[in-house]
Image: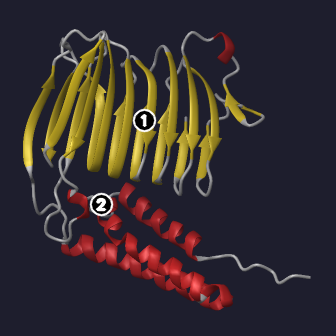
Amino acid sequence: MGERRRVSLVGPVLLIGLGLLLLANNFGLLRGNVWAVAWRFWPLVLILLGLEILVGRQSSWASALIAVVGLLLIVGLVLAAIYWGWGVGQTRGVTERVIQEMAGAESATVTLDFPVGDLRVRALGDSSDLMEARVSGLPMEHRYEVTAGSGDLRLESEGEGFLWWPDAAVENAWDIALSPRVPLALDVDTGVGQAMLDLSDLQVTDFSLDAGVGSVRVVMPAAGQVQAVVKAGVGEVVLEIPQGVAANIEADVGLGGLSVDESRFPRVGRYYRSPDYATADHRLDLRIDGGLGVISVR
């Protein structure tokens, strides 16, 4: 009989630590952007995994010791960084308003590459423009072109401020308002921080989210037929599907957790599906690829 393979404790224990930080942040016990601070210590994870491979696999006690010491070290450093304000809110950066006209577009693809901070996406009010944005922190670089009636808008932050240590941290925030007048394909890539994406009043036909480290809440479109792919990272992703929208949900959560409101979306084999999905006027096809966090669908 072969030797029983020891299970690594480093990964699960680090997930517990990240969960505790997320819980404390949600209850307002920790000030500032916890995830932007925690992300600075990611090389320690590589060190702990290396020690686990070198020493921990030889002994269960050594593996447990590495996991516990690593958890206390990372959580302690994050709390110390928040308490003493290392790199938190020391530079305010720029404040600007960005407006993008429609320029003849009848539909548009919008790509948001957001590295760190607080991101908000919502519907634009009574305006003929494609987008209005309020930006504070890192300067925004935006490109736009129209080809055969289809617009292509790309927004990203200039620089990689969230990797600087310790005195160049920037309080970064985007408030993006998009036109509800034209069909949109929306591609969002979040880095470290928090995001609130309210798509309920937008004509989003295709939606892609690549979540990084932190918390993301998405309210899906309330009308139309939507194709969506969500890739979760480390933290929490909450997906809200408006009443009146039927959904077909396929999920591969990996090491993370998944919670689906089965009173609305009963499980059918490998899918979660609304009973009226096949005949519904408004429906969502959703693919979820999990990471190390928790995903909730309601």
Residue 58 drawn above or below residue 14: below
Outermost residue, right direction?
1
Q: Residue at x 72, y 80 (%)?
A: 6
At label 1, the amino acid type is Val
**Label 1 crowd (10 A; few <14 / some 14-19 / many >=20):** some
Camera sees residue 220: no
Quarter of image, res 7: bottom right
Q: Residue at x 29, y 50 (%)?
A: 115
Image position of 117 (left or right of 134): right
First along the sequence among labels 1 and 2: 2
Report the disc number at residue 218.
1
Image position of 154 (left or right of 90): right
Quarter of image, res 81: bottom left
* Residue 171 on image: x %, y %: 17, 54
* Residue 200 on image: x %, y %: 40, 23
Image position of 128 (left or right of 237): left
Quadrant of the image containing the C terminus: top right
Q: Residue at x 36, y 79 (%)?
A: 76
Q: Secondary structure beneath disc 1?
A: strand
Report the disc number at residue 172.
none
Quarter of image, res 262: top right
* Residue 150 on image: x %, y %: 31, 14
Camera sees residue 67: yes
* Residue 16 on image: x %, y %: 53, 68
Marks 1 and 2 sit apart, C-alpha to C-alpha, by: 20 Å
At label 2, the amino acid type is Ala
Residue where numbered disc 2 is placed: 36
